[in-house]
Amino acid sequence: MLISYREALNQAMREEMRRDDRIFLIGEEVGYYQGAFKVSKGFVEEFGTQRVLDTPITEAGFTGLAIGAAMAGLRPIVELMTFNFGILALDQIVNNAAKIRYMSGGQLAVPMVIRGPGSAAHQLGAQHSQSLEAWFCHVPGLKVIAPATPHDAKGLLKSAVRDPNPIIFIEAQLLYSTKGDVAEGEYTIPIGQAEVKRRGDDVTIVAYSKMLLLALEAAEDLAREGIQAEVVDPRTLKPLDVQAIVSSVKKTGRLVIVEEGWLFAGLGAQIAELAYAQAFDYLDAPVVRVTGADVPMPYTRPLEDAAIPDRGRVLAAVRQLVNGP
């Protein structure tokens, strides 16, 4: 079944809310407006205003409310209009959601999903274009998921809703309208399981979220040059499927990591460290990272494009690794 990323998320939440009446959706304009990106289309009509809650513009407030509801036995899905606004709820996410299970000695759990769009779109400015997944990955107690395809988005969101832990679920804004095959019927995807999206023997490219689509496009170009790239999609950023990445690197001997986030202390640095620690003797060249620029995102389109990884940068990185300078 060919559907959009947006529709896949809608299906996942709708199916889970039908299955379990403890699940509710809360956030700004998720009800009658159907979500800023129409992910909750039709929800208020089916589930009513007791389970689809429109909130004031108060991220810390409704995130804290959802944490309390989760502690009391409900299973909230919090929609952030953008993860950039999630900065306002960081105290609740980091000091409450992520720590309550540990600090209560396991007596209290916080089964909740915090989801919404992240990363840059087109000319949204510096405050609305950030890739913050590395922040959340740094926090013990949180799981972080960033699916790239409609199939993965649906299966992983269903798994996230059922998980007993707080989960950060980041949906790149520019993916909402992309389409892909989604299996009909009930299915879930295990959290923490990567997938090899393309097989190859010459170089491993690790990419997630919308950077995966970029990596796959680059791999097709490279194949016409005789370079077979293996593209690995972590899907879940924490817990990370280290074995899948290391196994690929041991096979190809080369690793390129593509991420939209900033270079310094980015998620790619952690992946590179793991590759060096567990596959050092198999590497034929240093690990290369292709990242967003270490600058606030420019507003003007040419500068915005320059700040985000593109196909040319990925191709150049791979060619340098395989062919030498």
Image (tube, rainbow, N blue to C red):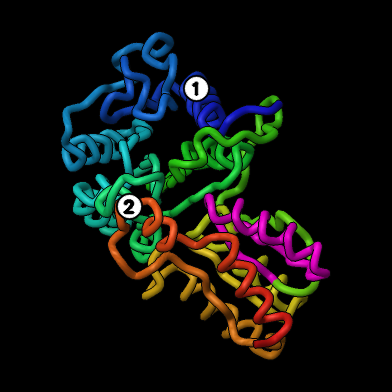
Lateral position of residue 100 relative to residue 202, left or right? left
Give the amino acid at mark 1.
Arg
Q: Quadrant of the N terminus?
A: top right
Pinpoint residue 167: horizontal percent, then vertical percent: 41, 47
Residue 193 placement (x, y as % from top left) = 62, 55
Please name the residue shown 37% across and 59% down the image: 303
User: Looking at the picture, how far across and down is residue 200, in whole percent?
Assistant: 79, 66
Residue at x 31% of width, y 15% of height: 32
> Seen from this angle, which residue lies furthest top?
45
Question: Disc 1 designates what residue?
Answer: 14
Q: Give the residues in magenta.
A: 204-233
Report if residue 108 is visible in the image: no
The residue nearer to you, when weighing 180 against 69, is 180
* Residue under label 2: 300
The picture places residue 56, in percent across and down from the top left corner, at: 17, 28
Residue pictured at 44% horizontal, 27% vertical: 39
Secondary structure at badge 1 equals: helix
Q: Earlier in the sequence, mark 2 or mark 1?
A: 1
With 26 as the anchor, is 318 left or right in this view? right
Q: Amino acid at mark 2?
A: Thr
Mark whose residue sits in front, 2 or 1: 2
